[in-house]
Image (cartoon, rainbow, N blue to C red):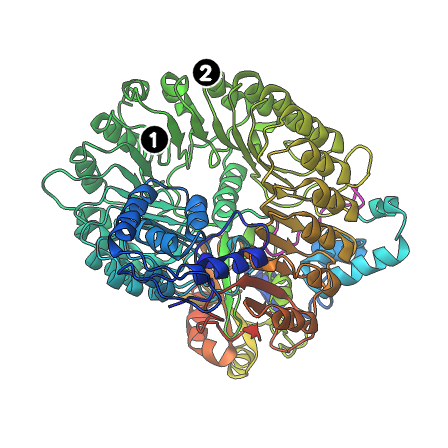
């Protein structure tokens, strides 16, 4: 049985154009139409006439499967599956990790029909702009249809990673009930569930090794709050290796938590929420000196302790600690406690700690091995200079704003950016929020840090030009795409003309993700990008003057993308209808704020789907046909 | 009249009055309003996400197609920033914004005081309106008065227009019959959930107290909010 687009069921990253591959796959299929017993059937138009005996073919298939077992990269696997039907089948049998980049791109059934031996599933739902309240509340990304299909198809499922999905307590209960060997649950930016769901997982997943809640919203209705930590088995040792609940707002039962930690000899990663005080942290650390990753909870005192324990030695006892985070309510006086571990740290997350430059310096001066640093801009340019002076191995830096409102000046600026670029030559990824910036600083970074893969600069003031020259920020971003040859992710901001996009289209050949806000002049801007960036997979644009002409200029490329998001641009329904007609495999969701059906589109969210438009769209989402 | 009574009884009713005039006009000119009126095209205009923004950009394109330098006039760096929110900008997750807003509050109020475990709700509160698909979040610390808040809400939810609240456009909590009229109508009224989990009519407590105790906002039809009126009246009377 032929499937329509077999090679597109999973993420297919390395194809530059879909049409030749489709044709290739068709040809491959038609020339090798053997069924499972190895008997070939002549197909009209093919050259196949021989009838080989079954045995060598089966051997070949077995060999193939054994070899394909070693392929772990999904790009490689997707390529292998395109060779011929036999390879397609063998690959499908040997794939163990299923990655669904867009939960609406394919139905659960199609996925489970193709792959029968999956042990690990990743599903991603909403686009990133949903994090910033740009999408209706009930837009979708429901995990429910997935969980029932997965429960049926893969009873031996071990790992589930979900990102930006709507997950209910019921879904979690189904997971807990359906997968006897379940080991790992990772929920990133998810919502819709609460403590009852966590309790189900804790109670029933006896082999659980990893439970990580990252930036997820755990709804807490007071009367429904459940002491989920107590639901872990009370006796015997657990298999827990990683427990992260720093985003859970409600307090946890500390006694139960301490008992749990004591019974978890394999525990390496523990990320506490802010209900855990310094003294409680101390007790936990004494129980788990083997920790490698620690989220410190509040890092302040909840109650007056008569005699403060020696926090520094507790930290010193954790000789394997490489990653520190938390500091949710930091009391800077406690900072010296972490000095003993700084030299070994490769990752430090201070992004919830509004420490000033001096306080940061006292810590950072020891962190010679640091590779990942997240801070707030409260550290000021001064603090960034200290980072540049010490952290020569820094690969990733994120600077978040304490105050996200637009101001004329901010605590970090081009001064800090230049300092970082001069000190941290190995930088690969940067996310930098600031109020003002200059082209010169960005150009400097482009030259000093040629290894940059991710460059995300967010100038909070919309339409802000270069703070010194008052020119647009075109040249700065142009230099980034020109000089950083490995760049795959770019976010632009500030005052930008079409010229910036011309640069991006001309030089940004490896760019896969592009974020644009309040930028550009005319349709040309978007055209440059759509025509010039062959690897573009995710494009999110808001409040930019790109219209129908620009939208229609990307028809050659949309099938290769995971999604296109355009909100508050200049699109009309007609153009969307045209795209829908030209590319029937696309789903165009038009989301409008107002009830009146205006011709202008508020939000267009567009993606390819193998199974047509979804049936769970809320009222204010119109799907163009 | 109500104002006089308020001053005499020390209740400072003016503070607590929810002024629901039409956005941008009516009522006393607040600081925020003046800024908006005087501001050039720029940040304040971006609050209204859709057409205002686009039309501003169009003007710009018409006037200065070939001269990019003209764009620098768009934003006067000396202009004080308008206290308005563009939805979803900057792209910081509201979870993080909430954390930070709390800290800013704590440090404003009590300098070096040790931060104890926080019981106040994050100052970013969810705002929902019956019938509207969008959940918004507002940072209550961005506003100084109920009027500011209601202006902002009016901008976020375009159906939340106010119309017939009376001559001065305020919910008069002392006048039972007026209140009941309002609540019997199909006009929308803002309500909020306080720390105790009770749903109250917005405007019944002084602004600062409101900011501290408000956990969530919900704009509902007056007829639905009618059950909240007695409680509001009670709390009002308890304080007088």
The residue lying furthest to the left in this view is: A235
Identify the image quadrant of residue A493.
top right
Q: Is residue A401 left or right of residue A472?
A: left
Precedes in sequence: disc 2 or disc 1: 1
Residue A272 in picture, x, y percent from top left: 32, 38
> For this rendering, which residue is in front, B113 or A358?
A358
Q: Secondary structure at mark 1?
A: strand
Whether B83 is among the magenta residues is yes
Q: Residues within 10 Å of mark 1 (few under 14, many from 20)?
A: many
- Quadrant of the image containing the N terminus of chain B: bottom right
Asked if A244 appears above or below A350 in the picture, the reply is below
Residue at 55% x, 46% y: name it.
Answer: B92
Nearer to us: label 2 or label 1: 1
Residue at 53% x, 18% y: name it.
Answer: A392
Report the residue marked by disc 2: A366
From which residue to which does the magenta span run? Answer: B75-89
Residue at 24% x, 60% y: name it.
Answer: A173
Residue A579 in picture, x, y percent from top left: 64, 68
């Amino acid at each position: 049985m032929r499937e329509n687009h077999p090679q597109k069921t999973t993420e297919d990253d390395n194809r530059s154009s879909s049409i030749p591959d489709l044709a290739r796959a068709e040809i491959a299929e038609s020339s090798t139409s053997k069924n499972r017993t190895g008997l070939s059937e002549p197909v009209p138009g093919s050259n196949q006439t021989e009838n080989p005996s079954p045995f060598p073919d089966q051997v070949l298939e077995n060999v193939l499967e054994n070899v394909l077992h070693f392929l772990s990269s999904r790009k490689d696997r997707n390529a292998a599956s395109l060779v011929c039907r036999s390879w397609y089948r063998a690959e499908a049998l040997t794939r163990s990790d299923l990655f669904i980049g867009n939960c609406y791109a394919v139905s659960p059934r199609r996925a489970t029909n193709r792959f029968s031996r999956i042990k690990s599933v990743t599903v991603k739902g909403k686009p990133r702009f949903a994090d910033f309240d740009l999408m209706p509340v009930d837009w979708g990304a429901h995990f429910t249809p997935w969980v029932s299909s997965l429960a049926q198809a893969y009873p031996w499922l071990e790992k589930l990673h979900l990102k930006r999905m709507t997950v209910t307590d019921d879904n979690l209960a189904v997971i807990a009930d359906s997968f006897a060997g379940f080991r790992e649950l990772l929920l990133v930016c998810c919502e819709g569930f609460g403590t009852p769901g966590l309790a189900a997982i804790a109670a029933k997943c006896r082999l659980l090794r990893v439970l990580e809640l990252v930036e997820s919203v755990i709804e807490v209705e007071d009367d429904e709050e459940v002491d989920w930590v107590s639901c872990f088995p009370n006796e015997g040792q657990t298999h827990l290796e990683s427990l992260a609940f720093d985003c859970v707002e409600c307090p946890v039962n500390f006694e139960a938590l301490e008992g749990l930690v004591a019974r978890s000899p394999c525990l390496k990663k523990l990320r506490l929420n802010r209900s855990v005080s310094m003294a409680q942290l101390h007790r936990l650390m004494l129980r788990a000196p083997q920790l490698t990753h620690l989220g410190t909870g509040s890092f302040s005192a909840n109650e007056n302790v008569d005699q403060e324990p020696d926090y520094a030695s507790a930290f010193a006892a954790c000789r394997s600690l490489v990653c520190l985070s938390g500091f949710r309510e930091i009391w800077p006086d406690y900072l010296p406690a972490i000095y003993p571990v700084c030299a070994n740290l490769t990752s430090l997350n201070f992004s919830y700690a509004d420490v000033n430059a001096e306080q940061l310096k006292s810590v950072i001066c020891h962190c010679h091995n640091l590779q990942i640093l997240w801070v707030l801009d409260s550290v000021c340019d001064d603090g960034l200079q200290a980072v540049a002076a010490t952290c020569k191995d820094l690969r990733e830096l994120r600077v978040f704003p304490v105050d996200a409102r637009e101001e004329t000046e901010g605590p970090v600026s081009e001064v800090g950016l230049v300092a970082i670029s001069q000190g941290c030559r190995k930088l690969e990824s940067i996310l930098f929020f600031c109020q003002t910036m200059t082209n010169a600083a960005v150009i400097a970074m482009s030259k000093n840090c040629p290894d940059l893969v991710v460059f995300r600069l967010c100038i909070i003031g919309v339409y802000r030009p270069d703070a010194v020259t008052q020119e647009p920020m075109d040249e700065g971003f142009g230099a980034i795409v020109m000089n950083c040859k490995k760049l795959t992710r770019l976010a632009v901001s500030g005052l930008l003309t079409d010229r910036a996009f011309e640069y991006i289209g001309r030089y940004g050949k490896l760019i896969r993700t592009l974020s644009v806000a309040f930028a550009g002049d005319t349709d040309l801007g978007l055209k440059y990008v759509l025509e010039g960036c062959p690897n573009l997979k995710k494009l999110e644009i808001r409040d930019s003057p790109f219209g129908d002409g620009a939208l229609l200029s990307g028809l050659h490329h949309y099938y290769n993308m995971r999604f296109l998001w355009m909100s508050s641009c200049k699109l009309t329904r007609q153009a969307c209808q045209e795209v829908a007609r030209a590319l029937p495999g696309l789903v165009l969701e038009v989301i409008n704020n107002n009830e009146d059906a205006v011709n202008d589109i508020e939000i267009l969210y567009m993606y390819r789907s193998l199974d047509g438009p979804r049936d769970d769209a809320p009222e204010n989402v119109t799907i163009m046909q | 009249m109500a104002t006089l009574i308020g001053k005499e009884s020390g209740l400072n009713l003016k503070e607590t009055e929810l002024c629901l005039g039409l956005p941008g006009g009516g009522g006393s000119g607040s600081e925020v309003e003046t800024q908006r009126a005087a501001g050039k095209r720029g940040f304040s205009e971006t609050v209204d996400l859709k057409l205002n923004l686009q039309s501003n950009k169009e003007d710009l394109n018409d006037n200065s197609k070939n001269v990019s330098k003209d764009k620098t006039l768009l934003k006067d760096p000396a202009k004080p920033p308008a206290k308005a929110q563009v939805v979803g900008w900057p792209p910081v997750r509201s979870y993080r914004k909430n954390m930070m807003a709390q800290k800013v509050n704590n440090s404003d109020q009590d300098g070096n005081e040790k931060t104890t475990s926080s019981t106040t709700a994050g100052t970013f509160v969810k705002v929902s309106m019956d019938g509207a698909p969008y959940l918004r979040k507002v940072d209550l610390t961005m506003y100084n008065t109920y009027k500011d808040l209601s202006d902002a809400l009016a901008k976020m939810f375009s159906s939340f227009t106010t119309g017939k609240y009376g001559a001065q456009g305020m919910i008069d909590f002392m006048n039972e019959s007026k209140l009941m009229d309002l609540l019997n109508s199909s006009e929308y009224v803002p309500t909020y959930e306080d720390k105790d989990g009770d749903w109250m009519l917005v405007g019944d407590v002084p602004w600062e107290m409101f900011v501290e105790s408000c956990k969530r906002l919900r704009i509902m039809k007056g007829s639905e909010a009618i059950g909240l009126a007695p409680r509001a009246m009670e709390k009002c009377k308890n304080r007088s």
